[in-house]
Image (cartoon, rainbow, N blue to C red):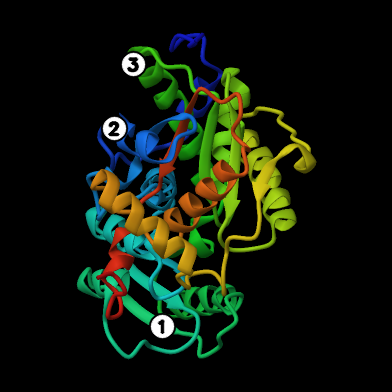
Amino acid sequence: MTVLTQTESPLRAFDTIPRHGLIGGPTPLRPASSLTKAFGGPALWLKRDDLIPFGFGGNKVRGLEFIVADALAKGADTLVTGAGSLSNHVRATAAAAREAGLAMEAVYWGNPPDEVQGNYRLTRLLGAEVNFTGDLDRNSVDGGIAGVTEKLQAAGCKPYPIPRGGACPLGVVGHALAVEELMIQCREAGVAPDLIFLAVGSGATLAGWLLGSKLLGAPWRIEGVTVSRPAEEARARAANFAREAAALAGISFEIDPGEITIHDGFIGEGYGIASPEGSSAIEKVARTAGIFLDPVYTGKTFAAYLHLLAQGHFQGVGDAVFMHTGGEPSLFVGKGDYS
């Protein structure tokens, strides 16, 4: 595998963008030999962003390093963002706000849950002010963020609104830099993956991986599994985010959405709702490898991986990296359905 040196890497163009360090170093890349033995197929590796040592981890922290730095540079005193009440992004943002000495306002769609559990409990524990739109439409969060921002401005505060789920060009930068991190780890481990396999929600994570991989000439292909929206929409969002993130560093970047591989059909009843297939995948991985996936992102994505594997989709793939993006607090919600 060819890995560019630090001075050669085109990703150094992003070094001019302020960064508020939260992660502290590379997340582990580990062989999942027990999973490979149990299910066959490619030699599987796990990139463990769930083990980011801040705010209960998860890859949302990668984007927040740049988002929070921008908020501080602009003199903000309050972060405002939103999603569903069990959002990993909102929980991670609340933790980042407290670490940076900022206040936090969370906007959730719908109404308050009957029980304070999972990420919602952690967000409340971090002292975030919570607001509910009363509307079950996820898009209502966007108007809610704008409304809370206006309210804070009228009160003399300096709010910094963050788009739903943290999906913005600055957030993409953190994921693009993760590509270089993985390439270095692969070189050190003596592995040359043919495939990166990851969950796709807002499209920001995928955008970063597409951007970083293209700029560095990474030898792998990237395949996503949508857990939130139709694949066609997710492709368009990822392409746009990648272009906009590159522009932050003065880089011209274009990718045809039609060239982006995103598998559909694994969302189940909807975003944030556990699917039987996802729950089964979570149980299989836990009992085979002692690793916990989550019901919103990685559980459904690993279910897709197993389905595609059974169809022979990964013929010719030697090594594959499964991105563990975190989200385990969602396992601590409800009565549970595992014996």
| Residue that carries the numbered disc 2 in the rendered image | 28
The answer to whether marks 1 and 2 mark residues whose Cβ atoms lie closer than 8 Å is no
Q: Residue at x 56, y 18 (%)?
A: 10
Q: Residues within 10 Å of mark 1 (few under 14, many from 20)?
A: many
The answer to whether mark 2 and mark 3 are in CB contact below 8 A is no
> Which element is circle 2 on?
loop
Instruction: Specify few, some or many for label 3: CA neighbours under 10 Å numbering under 14, 14-19, or 20 or more.
Output: few
Q: Residue at x 51, y 28 (%)?
A: 14
| Residue under numbered circle 1 | 131
Q: Is residue 296 above or below residue 148?
A: above
Q: Is residue 263 left or right of residue 5?
A: right
Type of amino acid under label 3: Ala
Front disc: 2 or 3 = 3
Residue type at mark 1 is Asn
Is 47 situated above or below 336?
Answer: above
Indicate which label's residue lies in the foreground, 3 or 1: 3
- Residue 171: % across, % down: 49, 46
Q: Earlier in the sequence, mark 3 or mark 1?
A: 1
- Mark toward the start of the polypeptide (1 vs 2): 2
Residue at 66% across / 56% down in the picture? 264
Secondary structure of the residue carrying tag 3 is: helix
x then y, percent, for residue 317: 56, 26
First along the sequence among labels 2 and 3: 2
Looking at the picture, tell me which residue is in the foreground, 334 or 94. Answer: 334
Q: Which mark is residue 189?
A: 3
Front residue (pair 12, 281): 281
Q: Residue type at mark 2: give it.
A: Pro
Q: Quadrant of the C terminus?
A: bottom left
Q: Position of residue 310 (x, y in %)?
A: 56, 44
State whether residue 69 is above or below residue 230: above
Please determine whether, in this image, residue 6 is positioned above or below residue 99.
above
